[in-house]
Image: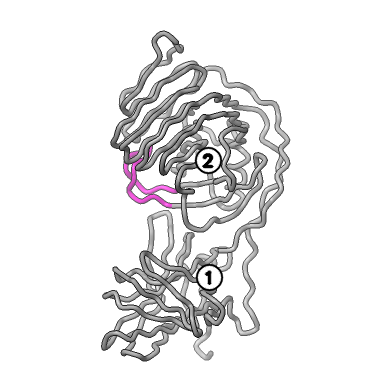
Amino acid sequence: MKLAKTSKIFKTLGTLLIAVGILSSCASTGSQNPGESSGGNTYDPKNPTVLTDSAIGEEDGFSYELWKDSGITTMTLTGDGKFTCEWTDINNALFRTGKKFDCTETYKEIGNIELEYEVDYQPDGNSYLCLYGWTREPLVEYYVVDSWGSWRPPGGNPVGTIEVDGGVYDVYRTLRVNQPSIDGNTTFEQYWSVRQEKRTEGTINAAAHFMNWEALGMKMGKMYEAALTVEGYQSKGKAEILKNNLKIGGELPDIELPEPPAPEEPDENGLYFMSEFESGSDGWGQRGGAKISAKDGVLSVSGRSQAWEGTERALSEYTYIPGQSFSFGVKAMQDSQESADFKLTLQYSSPTGTGYDCIAEGSGAKGEWVTLENPSYKIPENAWGLVLYVETAEGTCGFSIDDAWAGVEKSGEE
């Protein structure tokens, strides 16, 4: 997928007003198993608040929350929104302090949101250090990730790249289906800004990220939370929050917003791409556990353990516009069994979940090429995260592809 052009963002901050007290948390119909909630407290260094299980509360004008689904966790509040945390043998755990809102205002109505932070961050495995929160209407879980452990989240292809907070961030849009949320198990979107170079101290202007996301078509809802967060997933580690200055209010930053990526233009033959594999994989990659190899003008697929595994290529929804029709095709061949049923399929995300749509299919005899083609395939409405891939209806035979293409819609006479 083509990336959006990097936009230069000049940070001109208005007056920032420090929020006095904690805003009330909006009611939820079934949160991320938050555990017991305590009222507002003042930090007592002789008797600090120590959490070992899921819990929420307020202290020193900050909301705090420990959420986990399993494993060993400890979170100790150390005053002024700071804390220490440690985790081991967990599946998923989040430690966070910040501000809860009442879900009646968008970030534009609340005003600027800026976090100045410093963390001694020591992950061992998969973990994120981030500004984190939720919105409602729409329900969105969001991350501004400044550092991570063994894996850079969230995988997949970015929808754009932005320059903000003195660094470059890749922007992602992902979908969670029937997963824990502030409204119980449901389907919701995740928005991500992931810094290209790690850091563990600095300033995050949340409003600047939100404005950039909306310019890329990722709508923010009414604010539920903004919190400095350490998350661990199937890992262990520890962290100490040394500074957590969260400022709320004032004018939004005056920034230059990115333009959506320009659509690709078809060539004189009406093709957006024609993959002939004469000089490599041409943007096609492995799907699942399959292995691919481009040689002698074909792309070979091997090592498949499931029928859906094969080879795939990401498509930009800025070119392959949802609701519009295009032509797609590919030639496929297998040489290991009497016949195989091939499928050219589109995977996509939508507000209702992940979709899989067969574009074209056909049966190929051993050692013979079969053409899978659809001259007029309509991209589903409200789709994003488009992935074109070749699979078999069943079985795990190896196969090869050649002359894979996408182009403008073809009429019946063409």
Question: Which portion, as a residue range, is magenta?
Answer: 175-189
| Image spot of residue 397 (x, y percent) | 30, 78
Q: How dense is the environment of label 2, judged by Cα within 10 Å: few (below 14), some, or many (20 and up)? A: many
Q: Is residue 179 left or right of residue 42?
A: left
In space, the residues marked 2 and 1 are separated at their CA atoms by 28 Å
Q: Residue at x 47, y 64 (%)?
A: 386
Q: Residue furthest top?
A: 46
Q: Which mark is residue 147?
A: 2
Q: What's under tag 2, amino acid-wise? A: Ser
Badge 1 marks a residue whose secondary structure is loop
- Who is closer to the viewer here, 255 or 5? 5
| Image spot of residue 215 (x, y percent) | 62, 50
Q: Earlier in the sequence, mark 2 or mark 1?
A: 2
Q: Quadrant of residue 86?
A: top left
| Image spot of residue 164 (x, y percent) | 65, 43
Q: Looking at the picture, does residue 285 appear above or below residue 73?
A: below
